[in-house]
Structures are given as structure tokens and as C-alpha cells.
């Protein structure tokens, strides 16, 4: 009988620290694109994905130039890296504020283009930073579910990604990641195969001051596209999913590509 997946630790859903603490991280990301540390981390985590998890990605040609939102499902701390390792774009992720503070990793995050969203609060600063990235033609990574799924299934859509899609007019690329919910089993020396599929981009007409209902409707459309892709991969399983995707297009697995 296969062992059960290791459980995700309980998350802290409210950061009690004041907003002023995170101002410097937002300022850096708004004023500077990702620095050299992004490539170092991408190469290292990309090699880890290839060697330990035999990761393969398909459909990277769907990621356009110019402003784009990458929208992966979220079941692992590794999803940032699985989503960004196989494409030439520098993807800047919105990450929970608990990742920022006195740890040296805060320097790696902010200089690598990651910025905080203050958990448990309506954080307009995070949306301002996200829009600034898109305004300069950057690539933004954002999870439609907000936080990690504890079951490995696609959770409910949060309106935030719909708001960004409508207010920016940026293309949204749905990304299905199969197997990432089992990545934490590495502690048992179990390394699942990971398959990443980039779907055709969704494009929304730009709407200034979109209503909550409009934001939610856009988010649900994005979520439904991700779920359809992920459900298909899950139904087939990693081996058959790879065969299907190889039949559709050539894989992007050969190497971790250099930045353009």
C-alpha cells in the first residue's frame, strides 16, 4: 500500500506586523527588475526539478512577450520554481508576507523580484506593486486560489487575480502542475514525477474600476481553465500525460534556458 502524502503545516493566515515593515520590499520591486540572484536560483531549482522530480514542461510557446500573468495551481512551495524554471521570462511572484523579515532569504526574495502580500489584510500595496510590474511589461506569477491547496485539488478562486487581469489588460496564462502536492514526500526519499503544462493565454478586455462581481467572474474563468487542464493530467497520470503532451508538441525539457 502506498504511503500517504506528508501533510502541509498549518498556515498563519494573519500577519500582525505593520504595513510599514514591508514598504522597502515593495519599493525595490517597483523600481528594479529581478537582479542576478534570480538566474542563480532559477538554475539551481531548475536542476533540482530536472534531476529529482524528472520534471517536464510543455506549451512554453504560449507564454507571450509583454505583460503577462502566469496562473499556476498551488499545492507546494516548489510551484514558484516549477512554473518559472522552463521559460525565458523572469516571473515575479506575490508571496505571503511571513516569508519576509530578518532572515537572509528576504534579501534573496526581494532582489530576485518577489514581493510580499500582507496575510489577513486588504493589501493595496501588493496590488500596486503587481500593476507596476505589468505596466513595465513584466511577467507576474499569481495563484488563483490565493494560498496552497491542502488536498492537492484546485481550490476556490479568489477575486484578486481577476482584478489584476481586468485592470491591467495583461494576458493570463493558465499553468497546470501535476505532482507538486507530493513534492514534500522527499523527506521519505519519495520523488514524484512533475509535469508542467502552459495553456493558451486568456485575454480580457481592460476594465477600469471593475466591480467585485466582474473580478470574481474573471477569476473563476481562469480557475476553470486551470482545473480542466489539471484534471486531464490527473486522469491520465504522469506517464500517459507526458505521452499526450509530446504528441501535441515538442517538450521544453532539454535544458533550463538562459534569460533573454
Image: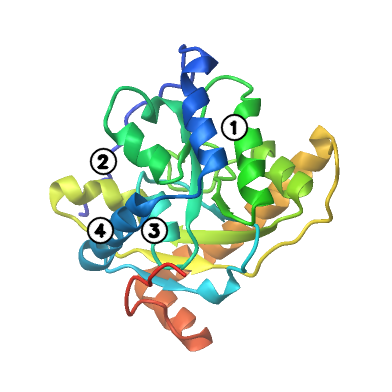
Which residue shows up at 42% across the image and 38% down it?
Answer: 110
Q: Which label is found at residue 6?
A: 2
SS at badge 4: helix
Upstream in sequence: badge 1 or badge 4? 4
- Looking at the picture, does residue 4 appear above or below residue 19? below
Please name whichever residue, 28 or 210, is drawn nearer the observer in this view of the structure. 28
Which residue shows up at 30% across the image and 22% down it?
Answer: 102
According to the picture, the residue beneath numbered tag 1 turns out to be 126
Upstream in sequence: badge 1 or badge 3? 3
Please name whichever residue, 15 or 146, is drawn nearer the observer in this view of the structure. 15
Question: Where's residue 22, x and y in %?
Answer: 48, 23
According to the picture, the residue beneath numbered tag 3 turns out to be 82
According to the picture, the residue beneath numbered tag 4 turns out to be 44
Tell me the mark number nearer the camera, choosing from 4 and 2: 4
Tell me the mark number nearer the camera, choosing from 1 and 3: 1
Q: Are marks 4 and 2 in contact (CB under 8 Å)?
A: no
How far separated are the C-alphas under marks 1 and 4? 27 Å
Question: Where's residue 26, x and y in %?
Answer: 53, 32
Upstream in sequence: badge 1 or badge 2? 2
Please name whichever residue, 88 or 48, is drawn nearer the observer in this view of the structure. 88
- Looking at the picture, does residue 107 appear above or below residue 14? below
How many numbered circles are shown? 4
Q: Which label is found at residue 185?
A: none
Tell me the mark number nearer the camera, choosing from 3 and 4: 4
Q: Are marks 1 and 2 in contact (CB under 8 Å)?
A: no
Amino acid at each position: 500500500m502506498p504511503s500517504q502524502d506528508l501533510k502541509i503545516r498549518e498556515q498563519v493566515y494573519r500577519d500582525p506586523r505593520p504595513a510599514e515593515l514591508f514598504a522597502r520590499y515593495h519599493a525595490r520591486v517597483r523600481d528594479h527588475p529581478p537582479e542576478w540572484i534570480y538566474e542563480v536560483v532559477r538554475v539551481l531549482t531548475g536542476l533540482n526539478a530536472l534531476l529529482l522530480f524528472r520534471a517536464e514542461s510543455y506549451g512554453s510557446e504560449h507564454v507571450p512577450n509583454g505583460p503577462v500573468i502566469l496562473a499556476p495551481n498551488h499545492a507546494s512551495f516548489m510551484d514558484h520554481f516549477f512554473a518559472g524554471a522552463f521559460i525565458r521570462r523572469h516571473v515575479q511572484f506575490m508571496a505571503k508576507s511571513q516569508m519576509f523579515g530578518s532572515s537572509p532569504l528576504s534579501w534573496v526574495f526581494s532582489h530576485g523580484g518577489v514581493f510580499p502580500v500582507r496575510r489577513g489584510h486588504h493589501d493595496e500595496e501588493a496590488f500596486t506593486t503587481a500593476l507596476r510590474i505589468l505596466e513595465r511589461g513584466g511577467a507576474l506569477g499569481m495563484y488563483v486560489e490565493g494560498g496552497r491547496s491542502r488536498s492537492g485539488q484546485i481550490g476556490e478562486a479568489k477575486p484578486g487575480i481577476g482584478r489584476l487581469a481586468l485592470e491591467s489588460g495583461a494576458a493570463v496564462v493558465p499553468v497546470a502542475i501535476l505532482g507538486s502536492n507530493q513534492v514534500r514526500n522527499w523527506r521519505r526519499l519519495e520523488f514524484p514525477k512533475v509535469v508542467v503544462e502552459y495553456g493558451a493565454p486568456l485575454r480580457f478586455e481592460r476594465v477600469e474600476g471593475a466591480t467585485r462581481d466582474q473580478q470574481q467572474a474573471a477569476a473563476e474563468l481562469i480557475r476553470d481553465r486551470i482545473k480542466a487542464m489539471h484534471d486531464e493530467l490527473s486522469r491520465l497520470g504522469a506517464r500517459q500525460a507526458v505521452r499526450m503532451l509530446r504528441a501535441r508538441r515538442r517538450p521544453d525539457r532539454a535544458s533550463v534556458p538562459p534569460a533573454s
